Image: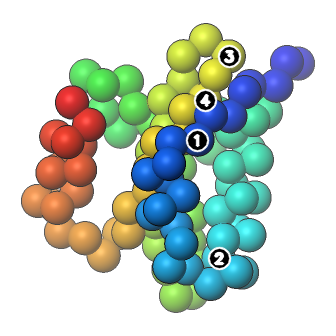
Amino acid sequence: MVDYNLIYKTEFFDSITNYDNNFIDLIRNRISYLKKDPYKYSFISSYRLDLFTIKVTSKENDIKIIFKVIGKDVFVLFSYSLDLTHKQIRQIFIDLE
């Protein structure tokens, strides 16, 4: 099986800087799954934009990581907290267009 290439947008790193090291390690662990098979633990988030999400959860934090697969490249775009309202999350996706 061929590994996928992970490509990170700067916005992704900006979105995870406020978390503690344990949670960041958990995020890195989840992202490592994307390298082997990005579809295995993910959910389709936007059919129109062809975006997927993978959830990362701990006792203190719940986030979703948004990514897009093009060929053998996985573009890790950004993450958002599940504490956001529906309108705030919708605005994030509108800003992507």
Q: Amino acid at mark 1?
A: Tyr
Q: Position of residue 34 (x, y in %)?
A: 68, 39
Q: Which residue is mark 1?
A: 8
Q: In the figure, is residue 42 to the left or right of 86? A: right
Q: Earlier in the sequence, mark 1 or mark 3?
A: 1
Foreground: disc 1 or disc 3: 1
Q: Position of residue 33 (x, y in %)?
A: 74, 44
Image position of 19 with respect to 8: above or below: below
Q: Amino acid at mark 2?
A: Phe
Foreground: disc 1 or disc 4: 1
Q: Earlier in the sequence, mark 1 or mark 4?
A: 1
Which quadrant would the C terminus be assigned to in this image? top left
Q: Residue at x 20, y 42 (%)?
A: 95
Please say if the residues under marks 1 and 4 sit with CB atoms less than 8 Å apart.
no
Q: Which residue is mark 2?
A: 23
C-alpha separation, residue under disc 2 versus residue under disc 3: 27 Å
C-alpha separation, residue under disc 1 versus residue under disc 4: 8 Å
> In what element is the residue under mark 1?
strand
> In what element is the residue under mark 4?
strand
Q: Amino acid at mark 4?
A: Val
Q: Earlier in the sequence, mark 4 or mark 2?
A: 2
Q: Which residue is mark 4?
A: 74
